[in-house]
Image (cartoon, rainbow, N blue to C red):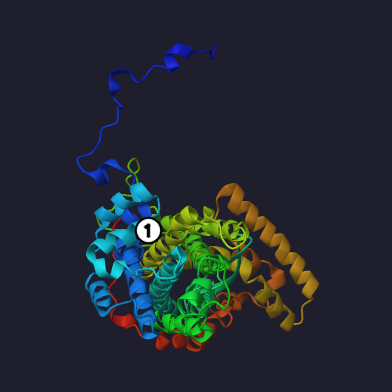
Amino acid sequence: MTFACDLHELQQPTRAGQFALALGDTAADSAYQNPLISRYASKEMSAIFSAQNKVGVWRRLWLALAETQKELGVVQITDLAIEEMRAHLDDINFAEAEEFEKQLRHDVMSHIKSWGLQCPNALKTLHLGATSSFLTDNGDLIQFREAMRLVHTKLVALIAAMSVEAKKHRSLPTLGYTHAQPAQLTTVGKRICLWIHDLIFDYYDLVHTINDTPFRGVKGATGTQASFLTLFNNDHDKVLALDEKLTKKAGFSRCVSVSGQTYTRKIDFRICSVLSGIAQSAHKMCTDLRLLASFKEIEEPFGREQIGSSAMPYKRNPVRCERVCSIARHVNSLVANTINTSSTQWLERTLDDSANRRICMPEAFLGVDALLDICRNVFMNLQVWPKIIEKRVAAELPFIATEKIILACVKTGQNRQTILEAIRQHAVAATWAIKHDGANNDLLHRIKTDPLFASVASSLNQILEPIDFVGRAPEQVDEFLHSDVIPIISSTTVDIDNMKPTELRV
């Protein structure tokens, strides 16, 4: 047998062109679209990072700069210039900007010139004393803050939906697992609380980051504010006032104290790390749900006409949770980008961060937005199957109950070590029968018919009540919801109860 092939044949184009590229009827059909936008993320989050919003923020920053400079005595900025700028904040002439950028290879200068076509009187003093980072960095921070606030709303909504399920199933016994092996019982509600607990850590990290993220402000080309000092004739107080007033107009409580041309890229790392924290929590939770779905204990919603497999019509795959895990891995991978970008910046600035950040930061937000929507959709339609859970508990409960049986025997005066060894031998035999013969778990029958256990045989059925093996799990659910969850839900200004159910596009 030979695996040799004709190299000439391999180099030929596909015969008959059956796989030839066929362009679609529209530009959207003929070009790659980021699935985070076309399939997964919400319109609200996509809009935050749209070109319309980005340049709209830039124009508002330019307006705020001009207004504040005028307030501080820059007489060259006229009322007519301000009026023109206010009149053209959102009617962005993208086509003209695109043509300018082809010539200039500079996005900010392209938009200065294109806005100048709409605001000829403003053009004379537009961008006065500023550098590109005045727009790009401050604009990014405004967009990031807006996006973090949307994430905050959706995170609280998810926690609220999960808390409903935790309370509903606070006392439903289920198998706990350690090392992926059946362990002591817990409750379905307690397990959901574990997932919520992770998200609460993310919630407080997010709140802190929203409140603590600073504005860049007006710092100039290398962060020295030299251009503004010249503009204000060496009046340091006016330079400081310009920075402070613009920071307040942008809605920030503070700006960075010092910077190079850009704000430190550690801020991007910090924000992306918080988003990664949410992604980590969602990934762990949805991995657990996928495992439980394989046991048929808990399942995500499944549409009446939904197809689980193109080949196996009985399949009910946990595609929502799988999608969360997939997107979460992508979000987590983006943290490395922010680490590398932050650590490789040269001196007062280098531009090798720009293209990376245009991709990395929006995708981190779009990904977290998507997985929060998917998770809320799952929990608002969660399917818990108590009979399946009960059946699986019953199969393992005789093993789990052995400690109680030992204690009951000791209370009748028997030797603990003797009882322990007898139960061990019965458990080994029962396990062999289960694995070798496919038998049901008959450990309890073996113990009942052993004369050594005659003193407790009649009470063994009472010992095997599942609810007696969950410890304080129901009470822990109540305490946790009261102390940790309700304060978060109560503190939000969003009407969570009347938020629309999350509808997924796919």
Q: Quadrant of the C terminus?
A: bottom left
User: Which is more toward the observer, 124 or 241?
Assistant: 124
- Residue 89 appears in the figure: no
Mark 1, other Cα within 10 Å: few <14 / some 14–19 / many ≥20: some
Residue at the far left in the pictured view: 25
Residue 117 percent location from the top left of the image: 24, 61
| Residue for badge 1 | 109
User: Which is more toward the observer, 17 or 314?
Assistant: 17
* Type of amino acid at the residue the image marks with label 1: Met
User: Which is more toward the observer, 283 or 90?
Assistant: 90
Q: How many marks?
A: 1
Q: Quadrant of the N terminus?
A: top right
Picture layout, residue 94 above or below residue 172: above
Left or right: residue 133 compared with residue 88:
right
Q: Quadrant of residue 81?
A: bottom left
- Residue 115 appears in the figure: yes
Residue 406 percent location from the top left of the image: 70, 75
For the point 32% across and 68% down, the residue is: 124
For the point 51% across and 85% down, the residue is: 484
Helix, strand, or loop for circle 1? helix
